[in-house]
Amino acid sequence: MSGSAMRFTLLTLFPEPIESYFASSIMARAVEKGLVEYRCVNIRDFALDTHRTCDDAPYGGGAGMVLKAEPLAAALDSVGAGEIHTVYPTPAGRPLTTEVIDRFCAQQELVLICGRYEGIDQRIIDLYVDDEVSIGDYVLSSGELAGLVIVDAVYRHLDGVIASESLEEESFQDGLLEYPHYTRPEVFRSRTVPEVLLSGHHERIRNWRMQQRIEKTRRMRPDLYEAWLKRTEGKDKE
């Protein structure tokens, strides 16, 4: 992705981990370079009572609490969410995939709702949310972590953040997982670096890495492996 800075707006009850993330490591450099902009909006600032209450018991009964519609809607309105692509990370969403990330990268700005407790009022989803996305088949107590996973997956594809060659053979590129990596020392606890990587023969190294990608995908993700086989067989028939 190229062009002006991409902006991430995160709505949260707990801004501290978000602020810390944007001030750290590669992300901090991306912000400093003007490649990324961010806003961290505290939903509690839009609560309607003196106790800054943002959650309540669910209608129909059940365990846990639900984020209330009024403060969350006011927070969303304050950032113009109605005109900006808005994402709600939730275990009930569609899986986060490379294809979804590519689609998010095409946006100039993303609004992410960081839920807590049992989730958010469904009417907020109906009125504001463009994408419900799951980062995996498990449940977190922190919507902030899930939101930052999406941010991290997106921003590293922005031009100038990470060298393009570093992205070319990552896991899920071409439907395969990444090959194993080795660095110094050459021998570690009686385990040696594969001889081919010491050969200096670029074609042999390339072929070895491809075979490693195929084998690891077959072993670790048979679903991806089967899909890759079908695509490869289809291309061979063309």
Image (cartoon, rainbow, N blue to C red):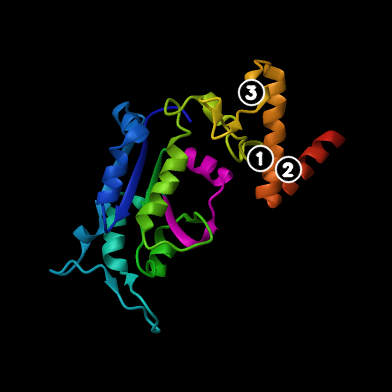
Please provide the residue range marked out in magenta: 86-105
Answer left or right for 230 relative to 185: right
Q: Which residue is mark 2?
A: 228
- The structure residue drawn at horizontal position 67% and vertical position 24%, both measured from the top left corner, is 195
Label 3 CA crowd tier, 10 Å (few <14, some 14–19, many 20+): some
Label 2 CA crowd tier, 10 Å (few <14, some 14–19, many 20+): some
- The structure residue drawn at horizontal position 15% and vertical position 69%, both measured from the top left corner, is 51
**Magenta region includes residue 94:** yes
Is label 3 in a helix, a strand or a loop? helix
Q: Residue furthest right?
A: 237
Residue 173 picture location, percent across and down: 62, 36
Viewer-nearest of discs 3 and 1? 3
Q: Is residue 229 visible?
A: yes
143 w.r.t. 175: above or below: below
Look at the image and tell me in which quarter the C terminus lies: top right
124 w.r.t. 59: above or below: above
Residue 79 picture location, percent across and down: 29, 49
Q: Residue furthest left?
A: 50
**Sequence-wise, which precedes: disc 3 or disc 1?**
1
Alpha carbon of mark 1 to alpha carbon of mark 2: how far? 7 Å
Alpha carbon of mark 2 to alpha carbon of mark 3: how far? 25 Å
Q: Is residue 107 visible?
A: no
Q: Which residue is mark 1?
A: 176
The amino acid sitting under disc 3 is Leu
Label 1 CA crowd tier, 10 Å (few <14, some 14–19, many 20+): many
**Sequence-wise, which precedes: disc 2 or disc 3?**
3
| Label 1 with label 2: CB-CB less than 8 Å | yes
Q: Which residue is mark 3?
A: 197
